[in-house]
Amino acid sequence: MRSTDFVLAALGLSLAVGLAAAAGPATLEVLVPDGPFRVGDRVPVRVTARGGDDLLWGELRVAIEPDGTWAVIEPPREVEGARPPVWELVLAPLEIDELALPVITATVRNADGAAGEITADGQATVEVGSVLPEGDEVEPVPLRDPIGVSGFPWEWVVPLMVPLLAAAAGFAWWGRRRRAAGFQGEVPALSPLAEIEGLLDRLGERLGREPAEGVCDRLAAGMRRYLERQSDQPAEDMTSFELRLMARRLGWSENVRRGLQDVMAVADSVRFGRIPADESRLRRAVDLARNVARELDTQLTARAEAEEAAEAAG
């Protein structure tokens, strides 16, 4: 064989190997900066799709548990123009340890339209340290001695008893009036959708003037009350994870379930993870909660009308 033929054969073999690798099985490559990080730090994550040229890539998902070790600060966002697709997201660690990133998956469809799911191979780990100064032993501040007089303040007994007795008498009178009127419990004057939208309007006016923790407390409580009124389930006593399970069990749409998860993730990261949230992030969460409530109301109304029509036809 001539040297020229040998070079051409080698180049052909290299090209065939490269094409075979490109057409290999689909995978997800996860990149995260080197640490160490501290609890609450923003950890940027980049996820790149590899292989699977015949697949149509869909939504990227991050498995976050309400009481887990991670919180989503910025949900996955697909980088424009990247082919194969690339996503970027921001997480925050909630514990001290060498933490594995949460499970990351992406939905795909083949040429026949069959849906599937790709899970990132191998969970990347991040070293998370304490927020306390390194090398210093921090001791609690000693308790101060109590201020004021010692002994039981008997001189305050009589002045305090007067308003307490008056309040007790008023409460007893109010109870008698309720029983006499045959009180059966209050009925909300507003529909579930009108009630939650009123709350979201008030929260939108308070953004930037009220601490993020207070906004998220009221947002989470309002969403739970709305979901309980719409589902007749004890949603006000459920965790965020239990809310997602309930939404799936009741057959709510994917948009409703995904939007509910994102709203509660923002609220939980601020309330429990002490993750700071600026006004724009809180406003997006409030707007998303409004969209979730409206879409769920439309879905449930259509379902009720269809059931009534089916009963009438039967």
Image (cartoon, rainbow, N blue to C red):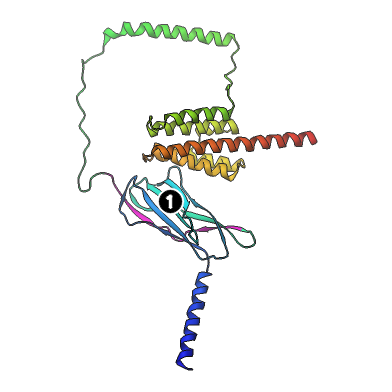
The residue located at (47%, 82%) in the rendering is 11
Image quadrant assignment for residue 249: top right
The residue located at (53%, 35%) in the rendering is 290
Between 228 and 270, the one lying in front of the other is 270
Residue 89 screen position, x and y as percent: 43, 51
Residue 58 screen position, x and y as percent: 55, 55
Residue 305 screen position, x and y as percent: 70, 34
Q: Is residue 127 magenta?
A: yes
Image quadrant assignment for residue 35: bottom left
The residues colored magenta run 115-131
- Indicate whether 263 appears above or below 1: above
Q: Residue furthest front?
A: 81
Mark 1 crowdedness (10 Å alpha carbons): few <14, some 14-19, many ≥20: some
The kind of secondary structure element at disc 1 is: strand
Identify the image quadrant of the C terminus.
Answer: top right
Between 154 and 302, the one lying in front of the other is 302
Question: Residue beneath label 1, please?
Answer: 89
- Indicate whether 145 appears above or below 136: above
The amino acid beneath tag 1 is Leu
The residue located at (36%, 7%) in the rendering is 161
